[in-house]
Image (cartoon, helix red, strand yellow):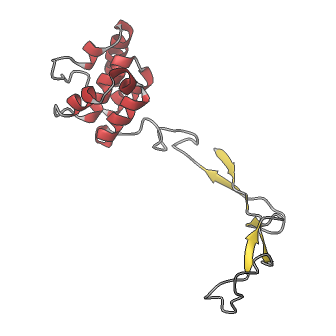
């Protein structure tokens, strides 16, 4: 189980403003204030008797499990959308290489599910962790693009092809 201390400190005090002679002094708190906040001595929010507070967070089944907590690898097929394709396209530097979003837009306009497009892109980049995540989410490696190529055919090398096929056999 992960322990994350949750002690907060917000140091501030209130001091009268004496350095603004040109402003009128207003007596109503609704119209203005003659006090301002400045940082000086520490003040704690929480227990004031010297005790410390620890927050315990339990992620996943056995404590620290990113997949069980919904952080990584817990997405399903329909949890991926067009924005994920664009973010991956940018993250992997494909925009810099391609010079435009034309390749990405062409794939998105072919009525292919975003998770399958992501698998095609990840296979062409040789991104094993992303390929594994997408296959776990239900991506299909045999979906064809407009050129009739699948993620397997777009794979950067034989190692990636074997990885996709091997992972798919393990999953089944």
Find the residue positioned furthest to the front: 22
Residue 123 drawn at (x, y percent): 34, 19
Report whether 142 appears left or right of 56. Answer: left
Q: How many labels does the image show?
A: 0
Quarter residue 158 falls in: top left
Report whether 13 appears left or right of 92. Answer: right
Q: Which residue is drawn at 37% across and 39% down?
A: 75
Q: Please tell me which residue lies in front, 166 or 88.
A: 88
Q: Residue at x 22, y 33 (%)?
A: 108
Quarter residue 33 falls in: bottom right
Q: Can residue 106 be seen in this view?
A: yes
Quarter residue 87 falls in: top left
Q: In this view, does 32 lie above or below 64?
A: below
Q: Please tell me which residue lies in front, 129 or 105.
A: 105
Residue 83 drawn at (x, y percent): 33, 40
**Which quadrant of the figure contains the C terminus?**
top left
Report whether 105 appears left or right of 158. Answer: left
Q: Which residue is drawn at 32% across and 29% down?
A: 118
Find the residue positioned furthest to the top: 158
Q: Which residue is drawn at 82% across and 65% down?
A: 40
Q: In this view, does 25 lie above or below 136?
A: below
**Which quadrant of the figure contains the N terminus?**
top right
Q: Is residue 139 visible?
A: no
Q: In this view, does 88 lie above or below 62?
A: above
Residue 125 drawn at (x, y percent): 38, 18
Q: Please tell me which residue lies in front, 33 or 49.
A: 33
Residue 90 drawn at (x, y percent): 39, 31
């Amino acid at each position: 189980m992960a322990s994350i201390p949750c002690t907060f400190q917000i140091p501030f005090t209130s001091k009268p403003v004496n350095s603004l002679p040109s402003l009128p002094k207003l007596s109503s708190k609704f119209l203005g204030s003659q006090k301002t906040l400045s940082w000086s001595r520490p003040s704690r929010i929480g227990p004031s008797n010297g005790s410390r507070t620890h927050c315990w967070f339990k992620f996943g089944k056995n404590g620290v499990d990113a997949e069980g907590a919904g952080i990584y690898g817990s997405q399903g097929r329909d949890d991926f959308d067009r924005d994920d394709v664009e973010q991956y396209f940018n993250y992997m530097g494909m925009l810099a290489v391609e010079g435009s979003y034309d390749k990405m837009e062409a794939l998105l306009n072919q009525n292919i599910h975003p998770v399958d497009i992501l698998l095609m892109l990840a296979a062409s980049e040789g991104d094993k962790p992303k390929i594994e995540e997408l296959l776990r989410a239900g991506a299909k490696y045999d979906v064809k693009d407009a050129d009739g190529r699948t993620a397997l055919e777009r794979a950067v090398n034989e190692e990636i092809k074997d990885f996709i096929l091997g992972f798919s056999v393990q999953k089944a």
